[in-house]
């Protein structure tokens, strides 16, 4: 049995080595077995830890199951959230309340084999975020198509690839996950955000849980994939153009201005030199609308640039990881001392 999550020493509270977050929904059937497997794997790490269990406050079965588990698990802490929004908001809520040096997030259903938890935590020795990659996962044709579409969009928009971006088992340094979670996006994209922000992200091979066990607690949400695609586009705009809004609005407005200007010039030339009438031509109205719409979009980007420049003049687009200061070499003591300029011999005047 490991030590408790925190030890009170007078007024000092010692932080644990690891903070584990588990978020659950549903009726709680099979949850006790799931958490028992998690507990055995986490205890085997030999680290001090805390486990924060977040669930819907309105779910009485989950509350009852959590109370039973907490009675026999000192490191187990329940945090019923009210009102319940979704798992993504619950994860952000939990990350802000962790106290450990590292954070481990685990799903509320058997997604991975608990024996792989140690591999995720061990990967933090060389990485800032360790994302699980299920190696023995069997997918249907529709699931494979969904994964390929999402991987293609991630590669096209962010120039990065993740073999298993849907895996919710991941570990990371606490300061990294807190920084990444500030965007409040879907938890599937936490490793993607970390990689885009310059952190070292490593995919760790883990074993997937058997399908029979996964079906107990997993809840299928048919519209989750559509919202994931929308969130991916939102994330792309937020990460790439939040500090430079004119680049985004300009990339949309300038082509509209160009097309509208060319169409208008073409119609005017036809009217002046070829005597084509303009009064009954809808193309003129369409060209002017494109021109005006493009100008408005570019103007909106300019307003955004002014707001950002005025409110965040000292905003940095980078963070310094380590400052390495130079020092004298080890054999510097054997070198002769530098001559003192004040003791230099006077120069001989020319004869």
Image (tube, rainbow, N blue to C red):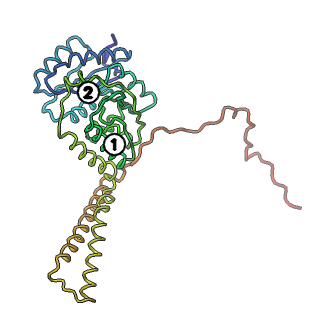
Give the class, few, some or many, for how many residues have Cα within 10 Å of label 2's Cα (few <14, many ≥20).
Answer: many
- On screen, 6 above or below 105? above
- On screen, 168 above or below 71? below
Of 153 and 53, nearer the camera is 153
Give the class, few, some or many, for how many residues have Cα within 10 Å of label 1's Cα (few <14, many ≥20).
Answer: some
For label 2, the SS is strand
The disc placed on residue 107 is 2
For label 1, the SS is helix
Question: Residue 351 in the image: x percent, y percent?
Answer: 89, 62
Mark 2 vs mark 1, CA separation in Å: 21 Å
The disc placed on residue 151 is 1
Q: Which of marks 1 and 2 precedes in the sequence?
A: 2
Residue found at x 50% / y 39%: 323
Quadrant where the N terminus is found in the figure: top left
Of 76 and 271, nearer the camera is 271
Of 337 and 155, nearer the camera is 155
Of 251 and 48, nearer the camera is 251
Residue 17 appears in which quarter of the rendering?
top left
């Amino acid at each position: 049995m490991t030590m408790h999550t925190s030890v009170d020493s007078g007024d000092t509270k010692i932080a644990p080595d690891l903070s584990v977050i588990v978020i659950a929904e549903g009726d709680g059937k099979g949850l006790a077995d799931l958490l028992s497997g998690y507990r055995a794997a986490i205890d085997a790490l030999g680290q001090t830890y805390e486990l924060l269990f977040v669930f819907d406050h309105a779910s009485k079965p989950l509350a009852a199951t959590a109370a039973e588990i907490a009675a026999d698990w000192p490191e187990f802490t329940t945090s019923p959230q009210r009102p319940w929004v979704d798992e993504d908001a619950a994860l952000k809520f939990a990350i802000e309340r962790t106290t450990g040096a590292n954070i481990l997030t685990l799903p509320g259903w058997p997604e991975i084999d608990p024996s792989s938890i140690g591999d995720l935590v061990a990967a933090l020795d060389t990485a800032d975020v360790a994302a699980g990659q299920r190696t023995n996962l069997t997918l249907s044709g529709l699931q494979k198509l969904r994964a390929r579409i999402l991987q293609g969009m991630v590669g096209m928009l962010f120039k990065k690839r993740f073999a298993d971006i849907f895996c919710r088992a991941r570990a990371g340094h606490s300061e990294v996950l807190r920084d990444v979670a500030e965007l409040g996006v879907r938890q599937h994209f936490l490793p993607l955000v970390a990689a885009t922000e310059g952190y070292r992200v490593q995919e760790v091979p883990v074993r997937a849980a058997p399908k029979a066990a996964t079906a107990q607690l997993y809840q299928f949400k048919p519209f989750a994939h559509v919202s994931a695609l929308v969130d991916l586009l939102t994330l792309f705009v937020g990460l790439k153009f939040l500090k430079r809004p004119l680049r985004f609005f300009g990339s949309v407005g300038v082509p509209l201005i160009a097309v509208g200007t060319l169409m208008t010039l073409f119609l005017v030339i036809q009217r002046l030199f070829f005597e084509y009438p303009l009064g009954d031509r809808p193309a003129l109205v369409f060209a002017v609308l494109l021109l005006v719409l493009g100008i408005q979009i570019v103007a909106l980007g300019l307003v955004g640039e002014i707001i950002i420049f005025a409110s965040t003049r000292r905003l940095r687009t980078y963070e310094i990881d380590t400052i390495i200061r130079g020092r004298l070499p080890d054999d510097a003591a054997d070198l002769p001392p530098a001559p003192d300029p004040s003791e230099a011999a006077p120069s001989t005047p020319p004869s």
